[in-house]
Amino acid sequence: MTSLPVLGAAMPLDALETHRDWIIDAQRDLELQDFITADVLNGDWMPLVERARGLLDGYSGRLGIHGPFWGLSLANPDADVRALVTRRMEQGLAVCEALGATQMVIHSPYTTWMYNNLDNAKNGRRDVVDLVHATLDPVIARAESIGVTMVLENIEDKDPDARCELARSFDSAAVKVSIDTGHAHYAHGTTMAPPVDYYVHRAGDLLEHIHLQDADGYADRHWAIGKGTVNWPAVFAALAQLTSKPRLIMELRDKSGIRPSADYLRGLGLAE
């Protein structure tokens, strides 16, 4: 029996129609992407949940969703805007509860501008943490009660540690860390951030989710794996040292690249 990690994928329900057998046959980790926008969350999303339940009949793998993020900063200084962000997080958790999902991806508040400027203010770093707590503290208890872990994904993060320190500040099993390989590779290529495997090492067992995508270090490509310049052997060597067993979610712009990407990593002897 192989000891290679098993790959999962992120996709909307339309793509799940195509990849359903591949997901269910190996009970792969799955992340649904249909519950991101305000239009969906403010509307009647139960038909989407019912459709997902039908497609996932026989599925016993680890299910998650990508939470809302468009225009939503967890560290917004405007209290009225933060209240909206809190509401969106609560809506995402309601979807998780209805689906039986156990993980929700949310976006890091840290930007390249912050990296270069937070130390200009006496309490700049503390202020970011406090603002995120003001946004998320009202929803943590619900996440804990329904067994959902919110994982903080790096977006512009140049510092691999700041997001981890933010997650630790909640002292809750409901807040952990995610890494997007393409985002980290972009930060490495354009802002002199560490390479992707360093992000994995620095997160350690706080890491419970990873978006696998290839890129060129210039932009957020979400290419099929093998099409860019991410050092995949180094990334998987770093992952092999963890005991947290993060969900390995291929997040590709072109969903037809999911199985070729899996074949590529299998060919390197890194995953299946």
Image (cartoon, rainbow, N blue to C red):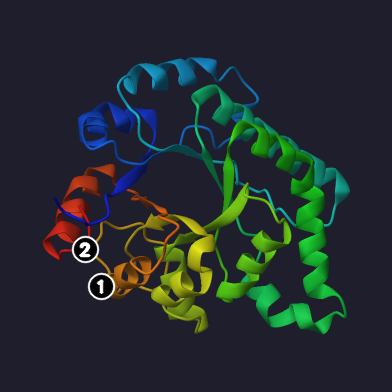
Counting residues from the N terminus, which is met first, the one under dot 2 or under dot 1? 1
Label 1 near label 2: C-beta < 8 Å?
yes
Q: Nearer the viewer, residue 73 or 62?
A: 62
Q: Is residue 187 above or below residue 139?
A: below
Where is residue 166? Give x, y as percent: 69, 63
Residue 137 locus on image (x, y percent): 78, 46
Residue 21 on image: x %, y %? 21, 30
Question: Where is residue 38 shown, x and y percent of the image?
Answer: 63, 33
Please name whichever residue, 178 or 118, is drawn nearer the observer in this view of the structure. Answer: 178
- Relative to 1, is 88 on the left or the right? right
84 horizontally vs 34: left or right: right
- Kindly state the secondary structure of the residue where label 1 is placed: helix
Marks 2 and 1, how far apart in space?
A: 7 Å
Question: Is residue 40 among the parts visible in the rendering?
Answer: no
Q: Which residue is mark 1?
A: 233
Identify which residue is drawn at 39% across, 74% down.
197
Q: Quadrant of residue 240?
A: bottom left
Q: Which residue is mark 2?
A: 270
Q: Which residue type carries mark 1?
A: Pro
Q: Secondary structure at mark 2?
A: loop
